[in-house]
Amino acid sequence: MKRVIMLVVVASALALAGCKSFPTQAPGAGSQAAPASASTAGAMASGTSSGQALGTNGAQAPSAGPGSTPESRTVYFEFNKSVVQSQYFQLLKTQAGYLTAHPNAQVLLAGYTDDRGTWEYNIGLGSRRAAAVRQFLLLQGVSKNQIKSISYGEAYPADPEDNEAAWAKNRRVVINFQSGTQ
């Protein structure tokens, strides 16, 4: 029996030791994390309002929901904080409006941190950040059944550099609409 327990402990330790290396792109981030392109620059030049972009077919991207731009689905946080700043209230209210109007839509709130701090601490901080966004959406009338959350901690950085600008991009919660929902 002691041998089995020891084997389980060693296997667990080996599995956790391998957790430090991560893929470079978050799950489901494929087309959602596309950088600004000529179509978005053209949107600004052609007189569309700030914060709106053109879709791939030239149509204006919606401000909320699965077709919205990554910028309209990302909330950034201060260093070591999990409080939603007031500058993101309107963004979250817009997404909440979409979710309440589409009760079958579901989102995954993905919490991230920069790479400072321990792996365990960063998982907890990413979780608290996702929980703060979840609470805001719930207070706006979104059903708890529409929201799931996960923390990736320092995994899948938006910017892998080691400087303040990169760290600021990595401290975020991304609202990912689940496929098959509307």
Image (cartoon, grey):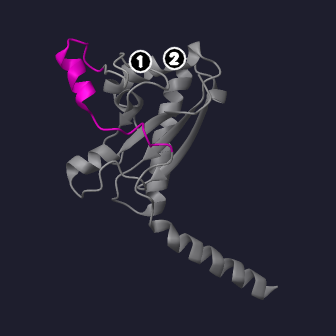
Q: Which disc number belongs to residue 62? A: 1
Residue 146 part of the magenta-drawn span: no
Residue at x 44%, y 20% (from the top left corner): 64
In-front residue for pair 119/33: 33
What type is the residue that disc 1 sits on? Pro
Left or right, 86 with reference to 127:
left
Query: At which x and y percent is residue 86?
Result: 33, 25
Residue at x 42%, y 47% (from the top left corner): 112
Q: Which residues are magenta?
A: 28-51
Residue 35 part of the magenta-drawn span: yes
Q: Residues within 10 Å of mark 2 (few under 14, many from 20)?
A: some
Residue farthest to the right, as pictured: 1
Callouts 2 and 1 close, C-beta under 8 Å: yes
In-front residue for pair 68/31: 31
Residue farthest to the left, as pictured: 45
Callout 1: SS: loop
Query: At which x and y percent is residue 8?
Result: 70, 78
Q: Which disc number belongs to residue 84? A: none
Q: Which disc number belongs to residue 98? A: 2
Frontmost of labels 2 and 1 is: 1
What type is the residue that disc 2 sits on? Tyr
> Where 127 falls versus 103 (above or below)?
below
Callout 2: SS: helix
Residue at x 21%, y 21% (from the top left corner): 42
